[in-house]
Image (spheres, rainbow, N blue to C red):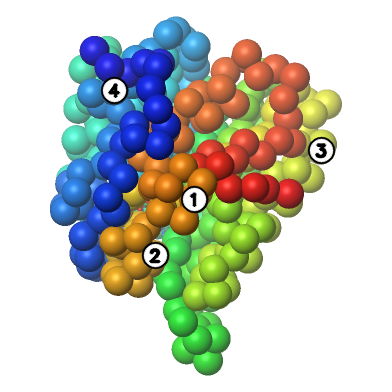
Amino acid sequence: MTDQLTFSDPTTRYRTEGFPEQYQDGPGLEQDLAVQADDGAQTYRGTGRLVGRKALITGGDSGIGRAVAIAFAREGADVVLSYLPEEQPDADSVAEIIRAEGRTVALAPGDVTDEAYSRSLVHTAVSELGGLDTLVVVAGKQQTVEDITELTPEQFDETFKTNVYALYWIVQEAVPVLPPGSSIITTSSIQAYNPSPSLVDYATTKAAINTMSKALAQQLAPKGIRVNVVAPGPVWTPLQTAGGQPQEALPEFGSQTPLARAGQPVEMAPAYVFLASSESSYVSGETLNANGGSPTP
Ligand code: NAD
Ligand code: MG
């Protein structure tokens, strides 16, 4: 079987020809993508790196979070997945893949802009998994708006609530239950340092996530909790078809990277596995860029 460890040319490892124009109402479903994404179900092979770990993954139904959930389960972790209620079909299908591995998965639908729900996720993990040692915050909102005069207060608020406030709420609730050795992993973006003109609110939240994570990494180091960031570049996920990009940008999506193609969700998963696993025990406050080779600060 070809898997993530198979030697290959990164320029041609995945689809190079761009994507068809497609629009889904937010948040969009992975199962409705016109071109299917690689979530790792057929291509990610576990090597025992997260045996016995207990992970909460937000945005775990689709895209990057889904690939992380599958990889974590294959590495031996039990997981709680957060996602929006409209995403139940994607959540059900990822749960099936995880159960087939013999791992425990608990599904916890809700809206992370609701503080009480965000905080409750920590307690769901403790009750369903018997504890929590790995917190992976992947959920995010990205809506392209060409002109600042059309960026509504509602969108600005929702983008910050989803991407920044929820992270604050969940981390604050989790820290008291995380044992030494735990790992927190957040999700920034190439947009944090190289913002698109039409992603003013989103790019700003991704810079905030990067900075918040580096502050937290120092604060939580004495407790034995590491905090790291994954910063993806363009990755083929439902978010891109649900207003994250203008539709007409999809045929060229990812082509501007040095590797000249979009990434696939499964290509993000090893970064999260590495940062969750004790093999990265001396790595904290780091941002791991998985972006097709674009330079970063
Ligand atoms: P995705 O649409 O598959 O995942 C985003 C998930 O966020 C959704 O599945 C949904 O479950 C969750 N979410 C959004 N709003 C929510 C809310 N209010 N309450 C609960 N859950 C909510 O897309 P993705 O591209 O895999 O996105 C995952 C993360 O990766 C996001 O943080 C995104 O900013 C980041 N990212 C993506 C790319 C990319 O090119 N795809 C690049 C850089 C960063
Ligand atoms: Mg989704």
Q: Amino acid at mark 2?
A: Gly
Query: Camera-side residue: 60 or 232?
Result: 232
Between the residue at mark 1 and the residue at mark 3, the CA separation in whole angstroms equals 35 Å
Q: Amino acid at mark 1?
A: Thr
Q: Which residue is mark 3?
A: 219
Question: Do the residues under discs 1 and 3 have CB atoms within 8 angstroms?
Answer: no
Q: For this view, does 81 lie left or right of residue 96? A: right
Which image quadrant for residue 73?
top left
- Tell me which numbered mark, 1 or 3, is placed earlier along the sequence: 3
Q: Secondary structure at mark 1?
A: loop
Q: Which residue is mark 4?
A: 43
Residue mark closest to the camera, 1 vs 3: 1
Q: Which residue is mark 2?
A: 244
Q: Secondary structure at mark 4?
A: loop
| Label tally | 4
Between the residue at mark 4 and the residue at mark 2, the CA separation in whole angstroms equals 26 Å
Q: Residue at x 23, y 23 (%)?
A: 42
- Tell me which numbered mark, 4 or 3, is placed earlier along the sequence: 4
Q: Can residue 87 be seen here?
A: no
Question: Do the residues under discs 4 and 1 have CB atoms within 8 angstroms?
Answer: no
Q: For this view, does 8 lie left or right of residue 25? A: right
